[in-house]
């Protein structure tokens, strides 16, 4: 009897695990940016949709990619969102990166299975800076998540004065020991304070130190912070 119960329990667990993964499949594709094409990763949940759409902007500079764009897009789709992760060109200056981000958002809102009225953006490091910059210039975003945003070469300072234009609730996440390459804790606090001063809806979570480099917390999709990302997106995209 005990053995039968154990087998039944295992079968139920397997069914739960299988049913929790809603992603049809992820695929690489290209989307237009002015006169060129940019690479991206798209993951769509199973079902007819349309689904809330979330654009993920990775970190890194040049040929380096900070984070795991494909894994984040897959995790978004597993949570019921259409996940889209553009891969920035290796030689893009900040101005060009801003244009590419705008093109990515426009491309996503044109997808048949994307609900353009439920659009969010998530960015890590340099991608977090780009996400914040986008949030000061757009009115169609329903949620913004900044993972250890970077400063850029004066880009953050120039963008902070436009915090009053942000219309979407903003969640800012950073690890307490994220200070090796830059003081990302201070950057996160600056953005949070600017949004607060402008009476915007904002939340800052500072996690305990992550190993010997807090910035690497966001190099992978980890339950310690992903649960907060997923909860925030679920609330503000009205799933």
Image (tube, rainbow, N blue to C red):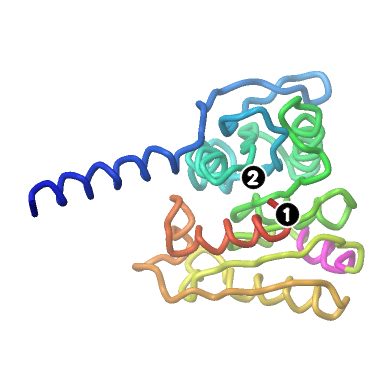
Mark 1 Cα shell of 10 Å, populated few (<14), some (14-19), many (≥20): few
What secondary structure do most residues of the magenta stretch adopt?
A: helix
Nearer-the-camera pick, 129 or 173: 173
Residue in the picture at 64% in, 45% down: 57
SS at mark 1 in the image? loop
Q: Residues within 10 Å of mark 2 (few under 14, many from 20)?
A: many
- Of 87 and 43, nearer the camera is 43
Residue picked out by circle 1: 238
The residue drawn where x is 8% and y is 51% is 1
The quarter holding residue 43 reads top right
Please identify the residue farthest to the front as the structure is shown: 1
Q: Which mark is residue 5?
A: none
Q: Position of residue 236 (x, y in %)?
A: 73, 58
Q: Is residue 156 magenta?
A: yes
Q: Do residues under tags 2 and 1 come within 8 Å of each other at their CB atoms?
A: no
What secondary structure is found at the residue carrying circle 2?
strand
Q: Marks 2 and 1: which is nearer the front?
A: 1
Left or right position of 96 against 15: right
The mark nearer the N terminus, 2 or 1, is 2
83 part of magenta stretch: no
Residue labelled with disc 2: 57
Out of 26 and 40, give the one closest to the viewer.
26
Picture residue at 66% right of the left edge, 56% below the top: 233
**Residue visible at 81% across and 19% down in the picture:** 35
Disc 2 versus disc 1: distance between alpha carbons? 22 Å
| Residue 71, horizontal then vertical, whole percent | 47, 40
Determine whether, in the image, residue 204 is placed left or right of residue 214: right
Range drawn in magenta: 155-163
Q: Is residue 211 above or below residue 141?
A: below
Where is 37 relative to 97, above or below? above
């Amino acid at each position: 009897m005990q053995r039968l119960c154990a087998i039944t329990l295992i079968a139920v667990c397997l069914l739960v695990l299988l049913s929790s993964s809603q992603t049809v499949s992820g695929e690489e594709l290209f989307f237009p940016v002015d006169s060129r094409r940019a690479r991206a990763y798209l993951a769509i949940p199973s079902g007819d949709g349309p689904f809330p759409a979330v654009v993920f902007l990775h970190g890194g500079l040049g040929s380096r990619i900070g984070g795991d764009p494909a894994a984040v897009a897959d995790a978004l789709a597993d949570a019921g969102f259409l996940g889209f992760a553009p891969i920035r060109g290796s030689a893009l200056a900040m101005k060009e990166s801003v244009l590419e981000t705008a093109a990515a958002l426009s491309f996503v809102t044109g997808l048949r299975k994307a609900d353009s009225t439920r659009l969010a953006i998530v960015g890590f490091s340099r991608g977090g800076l780009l996400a914040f910059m986008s949030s000061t210039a757009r009115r169609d975003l329903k949620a913004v998540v900044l993972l250890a945003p970077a400063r850029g070469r004066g880009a953050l300072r120039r963008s902070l004065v436009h915090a009053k234009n942000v219309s979407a609730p903003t969640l800012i996440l950073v690890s307490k020991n994220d200070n090796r390459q830059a003081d990302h804790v201070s950057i996160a606090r600056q953005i949070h304070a600017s949004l607060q001063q402008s009476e915007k809806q904002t939340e800052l979570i500072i996690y305990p130190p992550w190993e010997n480099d807090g910035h690497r917390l966001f190099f992978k999709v980890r339950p310690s912070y992903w649960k907060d990302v997923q909860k925030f997106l679920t609330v503000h995209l009205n799933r």
